[in-house]
Amino acid sequence: MTRPPHQHVEVRSAYADSVALLQVSRTVAALPGVAAAQVAMATPLNLDVLAGMGFEVPDDAGPNDMVVALRLVDGDPTTLEAAVAGVDAALRALRSARPAAAGAQAPPRTTASALRGADPGDPVLVSVPGASAAVEAADALAAGHDVMIFSDNVPLEHEVALKRAAAERGLLVMGPDCGTAVLDGVGLGFANVTRPGPVGVVAASGTGCQQLLALLDHAGVGVSWALGVGGRDLGRAVGGLATREALRRLDADPGVERIVLVSKPPDDEVAAALASYAATLGTPVQLALLGPGLPDLTAVAEQVLADLGVPVPQWPVAGEVHREVRGELLVGLFAGGTLAQETELLCRQAGVPHEVVDLGDDELTHGRAHPMIDPTLRLERLVGALEHPHTGVVQVDVVLGHGADPDPAATLVPALAEAARPVVVSLVGTAADPQDLLAQRTALARVAEVHLSNAGATRRAIGLLTGGAR
């Protein structure tokens, strides 16, 4: 006779960042006797997730507490003891991974003290909770360093203040809300591995930048610089402060032959002002500004290739759609905000009913890891989308590169294997990315049709709904 599932929930006075706890959860979930495990800080969003998983967390748990929630295959006390021991071991491994050599100097207690004696040419990467990012970034700017803010949920007024301060010093603030940068070939944040080359990218869009990197790399063209200036930089409040500085720097680099400026739909006046500024530069600037009637990112990449005299390749497609289209709706579940917006624009243009969700939006990532790292939120929504009677086709993106999920196909393929709807995947990555692009494509192609071009994937999904040709 099978014993009923057993649950264990405890609250600890401890802290670790969300990415580290995601790894702890995965490690513990793989232990014998553990059916499910969630180790997370007790933020409001995480408490909702835990409640959705059926765990009852004590009411007095707060954001500074760590929750250990386990579902076991039986109620045997030795199973629980082993699982809790596994949690403790995973947390100890996390702490021991941090540098703590005997006799070493105590780590600096502030950003300012850490930067004493540092080369001013070294950029500073800030990755703390968004509300605290401005203090650390301001310290770095005061010390004369460029800053990349990897944090999300940074208040807009903080971003404006930091970028004004940077502009006064001739410094550059990259981010927030664009966690991608390639600095002279070195990637920071979510960055694909690309060959060095003549193209420089200024990006108010993380996954838009990565789409360009992937397409250009597939065509054999390298990118040496990708400056992620933040998703709000081309908005009215920020006014393109970081974009202007990034354009100036790339124009001054003799190795950059073409500059591409990519952004989610910008403020019209800011876009016009930046276009005027770009026209004064010695290096040609290709605008990749998403909006109604404007070229999609694949079309921009093809224009850049044409300008460089490089033949446009056939963008790769793998796998086939086997399922029947039953509903009228295109459901898009995206980790990349720009890819989501590109798909939404193409659906509107085609007059196709659609529901496209940017799962990386600040409102959905508060207190939890980005969906490019943690697939939990997408997997939850995917179940509902595949079962909904109005769903005709599902489109998802999978973005590879440093910082992203080391094996996204491992969780996505089982979730799609039993899908009763056609699924189209935008797989954004390069052959040199650590996840192995070919292996990911091969795995995903068993359950979906896989495209390198997001615009191509969306047009295929639209074609399935409307009966158009592939």
Image: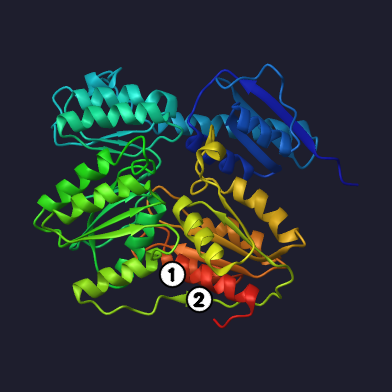
Label 1 CA crowd tier, 10 Å (few <14, some 14–19, many 20+): few
Taking the spot 47% from the left edge, 52% from the top edge, the residue there is 336
Taking the spot 73% from the left edge, 68% from the top edge, the residue there is 327
Q: Position of residue 152 (x, y in %)?
A: 44, 36
Q: CA distance from mark 2 to mark 1?
A: 10 Å
> Of 185 and 151, which appears nearest the observer?
151
Q: Residue furthest right?
A: 1
Whether residue 182 is visible, yes or no, is no
Taking the spot 38% from the left edge, 68% from the top edge, the residue there is 298
For residue 438, the mark is 1
Label 2 CA crowd tier, 10 Å (few <14, some 14–19, many 20+): some
Q: Earlier in the sequence, mark 2 or mark 1?
A: 2
Q: Quadrant of the C terminus?
A: bottom right
Amino acid beneath label 2: Ala
Does 322 sit left or right of 228 as displayed?
Answer: right
Q: Position of residue 200 (x, y in %)?
A: 22, 56
The secondary element bearing badge 1 is classed as helix
Label 2 vs label 1, nearer the camera: 2
Evaluate if marks 2 and 1 touch, with contact meaning CB atoms under 8 Å apart: no
